[in-house]
Amino acid sequence: MNGTNRETQADRPGAGGVLFILLGASNLARAYSGFARLLEEGVRPRPARFLNAMGPGRGYSRPGGFVSVVYPPIGSCGLFSAAREQADGAERTVALVADIGNDIMYGASAEDVVADLEAIFEKLRGLGADILAVPIPEIFEDNFGEFYFRCLRFLFYPRSSAGRAEAVAAIRRINRFLKDSESGRGIRLIRGLDRYCGFDKIHYDFFQMHRVWSEISREIFRVLETDPPPALGPLSMAASLGANMLRLFFSDMLPFVKKGPGFY
């Protein structure tokens, strides 16, 4: 599958270069192959290594997934144990925390999510990582309609019993925590991506994905003080979508192809 070489290099301690820790759910999984390749290009001739926790419906606090696939919570998966060894051998470590919010629909309270995010930030700071995070889209902080909320819940969280009012309150609390973390804990927030959201406002529009991940990569390269490579194009994102479908069906849903050691 696309990205095999990149995945099999992920557990090679002492290799120097830049360690990227990528955390997220469906948006990250859809773009992963092209996005990771762009990061590789941007740090050359230094090697890039990747540790990843992602997948549709993935949560930070609660198990979550898609159809028959259930992923462990990002906060308690084995990635951080591996990251300690990996970070010791890296020149720089950069972490991206994206796709926050699924836990709300799985019944986690805002305080549970905040506590788990803070614990993740602490682990990442302990690795000496530069941390970037993407807030939950601001539209979900507004008092959006009950019908719209129920449609989203039916489509993406059919087993959820979360109500609109509690979801809105939780999103506001989590985004406030992220904003406070930017000023008080050194977390860099990547704002302004809401304009690329598709009809459901949860996922980025298929035709805008290359712009989203190009912007995110530019923020990462700004942290690394490295000139970014040329931006991603639509064809690269189309290939990433295809690679994600292969990974989802043949590695996550069916045990035909073993995922690389950098995936948790």
Image (cartoon, helix red, strand yellow):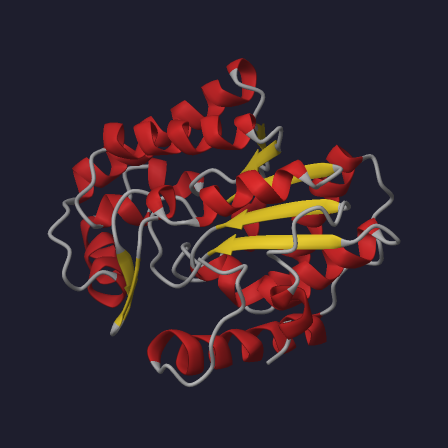
Locate residue 247, reporting x and y percent: 48, 76
Horizontal side, residue 228 vs residue 32: left or right: right
Residue at 11% x, 52% y: name it: 161
Locate residue 243, reporting x and y percent: 56, 77
- Residue sitting farthest toward the top: 184
Quick one: quadrant of the N terminus?
A: bottom right
Horizontal side, residue 220 vs residue 112: left or right: right
Horizontal side, residue 153 vs residue 183: left or right: left
Picture quadrant where residue 10 is located: bottom right
Residue at 72% x, 37% y: name it: 92
Horizontal side, residue 230 vs residue 169: left or right: right
Residue at 47% x, 42% y: name it: 80
Locate residue 241, reporting x and y percent: 55, 74
Residue at 52% x, 14% y: name it: 184
Picture quadrant where residue 140 is located: top left
Question: Looking at this view, is 107 or 43 the one in front?
Answer: 43
Q: Tally the marks.
A: 0
Q: Is residue 46 above or below residue 9?
A: above
Question: Looking at this view, is 34 or 167 the one in front?
Answer: 34
